[in-house]
């Protein structure tokens, strides 16, 4: 009986200690972690990181001797902005000032953009072993890589023309970022969005003046072109009227000429047809048989009078 009591007492003691340890673990979070979907755990035993990331689930480990850190593997957006650069970072959203670089003449230019990256789940333990922790690796492999790509991109352009070459800037930046992330084992490039190109205010004002002058010149050119087209249209109309009048006049003249030629030809034929024989014959045909008498003296004018 004594033995049974001792045994039960020992079991109860062990159970009590176990429950006490579990309660302490639950309250403090030591020795127990929940890894949710979209996250991975990085387990450290003693002084060594385990090279397999811990997948979603409930996980117990030995306090003090073991530790676990849970990090996201979902895409993280880094927003480089003029107005939001000092906002507090969130788990999936980092706020950074617009990135700055120098053009070929040493004039500063800034780019406002957003770059989205995704942590490599299988490489998280190696990241911790190599860089110490997530934050340090993110700074070196993401923030620093982005900054270098932007600085190199800006150096390829001039402050005088970069505002008109947005597509080329975006193309160059995309190429450089893809090249850097292709060599990055811990983060994958997901998306790039160039939002704005910011040049010094004085240069911006000059560029706006130049742009306005170009627009005015373009409008003037369009007005001149419109006036030229209208003048050509009016000239075409006038030429059409002139051609029509000329054609009509030519037609009338041709018709009159043809008529005159026909009349002349007819007169000529009539003239040629009036021979002496025809005239005598016509006179004979028209005589009524009455002999004409002469009126007047021999010295005066006279006429024949037919009775």
Image: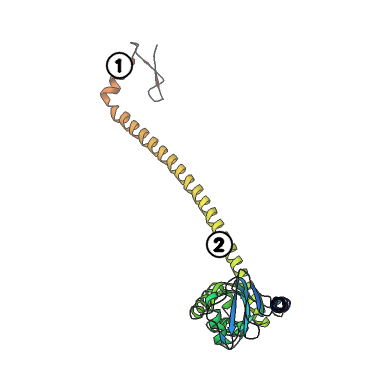
x 37%, y 33%: residue: 263
Q: Is residue 12 in view from this perspective? A: no
Q: Nearer the viewer, mark 1 or mark 2?
A: 2
Image-based side of 129 in relation to 29, left or right: left
Within the image, what quadrant is residue 287 found in? Answer: top left
- Residue 176 appearing in the image: yes
Could you tell whether 283 is left or right of 225 in the image? left
Observer-nearest residue: 291 or 65? Answer: 65
Circle 1 Cα neighbour tier, 10 Å, few/some/many (<14 / 14–19 / ≥20): few
Q: Quadrant of the C terminus?
A: top left
User: What residue do we see at 46% from left, 42% from top?
Assistant: 248
Quadrant for residue 195, please give it.
Answer: bottom right
Q: Which mark is residue 129?
A: none
Q: Residue furthest front?
A: 1
Q: Residue at x 57, y 66 (%)?
A: 221
Q: Which residue is mark 1?
A: 284
Disc number for residue 225: 2
Mark 2 packing: few (<14 Cα in 10 Å), some, or many (20+)?
few
């Amino acid at each position: 009986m004594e033995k049974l009591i001792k045994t039960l007492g020992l079991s109860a003691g062990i159970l009590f200690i176990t429950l006490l340890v579990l309660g302490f673990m639950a309250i403090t979070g030591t020795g127990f972690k929940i890894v949710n979907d979209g996250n991975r755990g990085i387990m450290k035993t003693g002084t060594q990181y385990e090279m397999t990331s811990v997948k979603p689930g409930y996980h117990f480990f030995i306090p003090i001797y073991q530790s676990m850190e849970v990090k996201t593997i979902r895409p993280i957006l880094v927003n480089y902005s003029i107005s939001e650069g000092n906002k507090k970072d969130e788990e999936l959203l980092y706020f950074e000032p617009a990135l700055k670089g120098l053009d070929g003449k040493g004039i500063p230019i800034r780019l406002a953009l957003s770059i989205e990256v995704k942590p490599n789940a299988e490489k998280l333990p190696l990241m911790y072993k190599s860089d110490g922790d997530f934050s340090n690796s993110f700074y070196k492999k993401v923030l620093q890589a982005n900054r270098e790509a932007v600085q190199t991109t800006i150096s390829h352009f001039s402050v005088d023309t970069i505002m008109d070459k947005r597509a080329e800037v975006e193309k160059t930046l995309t190429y450089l970022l893809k090249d850097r992330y292709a060599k990055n084992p811990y983060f994958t490039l997901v998306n790039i969005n160039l939002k704005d190109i910011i040049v010094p205010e004085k240069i911006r004002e000059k560029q706006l003046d130049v742009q306005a002058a170009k627009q005015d010149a373009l409008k003037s050119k369009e007005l001149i072109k419109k006036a030229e087209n209208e003048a050509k249209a009016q000239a075409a109309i006038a030429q059409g009227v002139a051609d029509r009048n000329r054609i009509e006049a030519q037609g009338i003249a041709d018709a009159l000429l043809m008529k005159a030629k026909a009349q002349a030809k007819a007169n000529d034929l009539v003239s040629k047809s009036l021979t002496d024989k025809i005239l005598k014959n016509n006179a004979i045909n028209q005589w009524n048989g009455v002999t004409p008498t002469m009126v007047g003296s021999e010295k005066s004018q006279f006429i024949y009078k037919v009775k």
